[in-house]
Amino acid sequence: MYVQSGMVQPDAGDLVSLSELVNELLGRRDERSRKVFHMRLEGYSFREIDEKIGISENSARVLEYRTRAYLQKELRKEGYGND
């Protein structure tokens, strides 16, 4: 990491490590949660997720929320994010 304009900027190695950690953490979630999370990252709407994998829009919202909350909590434990 380095400091630019008063902000800490990650270098390429930090980003690779973070990416690996996120993938490891996602691997601990159930397949449906991972699928919803990845589909949202790819730009799918909750309605499209409903149509593609057969869960309600509300269930997709809940799964995404819980997966994001889990990642945030675990990443903070690892020293990433706001304290």
Image (cartoon, rainbow, N blue to C red):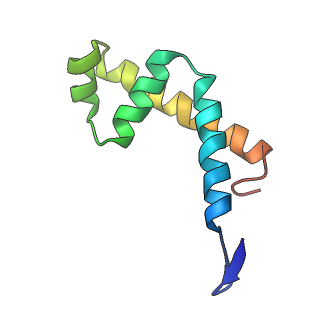
Q: Which quadrant is home to the N terminus?
A: bottom right
Which residue is at the front of the view, 47 or 24? 24
Extreme residue in the bottom direction? 5
Judge from the rendering whether residue 44 lies leftward or rightward of residue 16; answer left or right.
Answer: left
Q: Is residue 50 above or below residue 71?
A: above
Q: Is residue 3 above or below residue 13?
A: below
Residue pictured at 71% horizontal, 38% vertical: 74
Judge from the rendering whether residue 11 lies leftward or rightward of residue 47; answer left or right.
Answer: right
Q: How many marks?
A: 0
Judge from the rendering whether residue 68 lies leftward or rightward of residue 9; answer left or right.
Answer: left
Q: Percent position (x, y) of residue 12?
A: 61, 64
Asked which quadrant contains residue 6, the reply is: bottom right
Q: Is residue 58 above or below residue 14?
A: above
Q: Which quadrant is home to the C terminus?
A: bottom right
Q: Percent position (x, y) of residue 17?
A: 67, 50
Which residue is at the front of the view, 1 or 61? 1
Residue pictured at 23% horizontal, 19% vertical: 52
Q: Percent position (x, y) of residue 36?
A: 40, 27
Asked which quadrant contains residue 51, the reply is: top left
Q: Percent position (x, y) of residue 49?
A: 28, 25
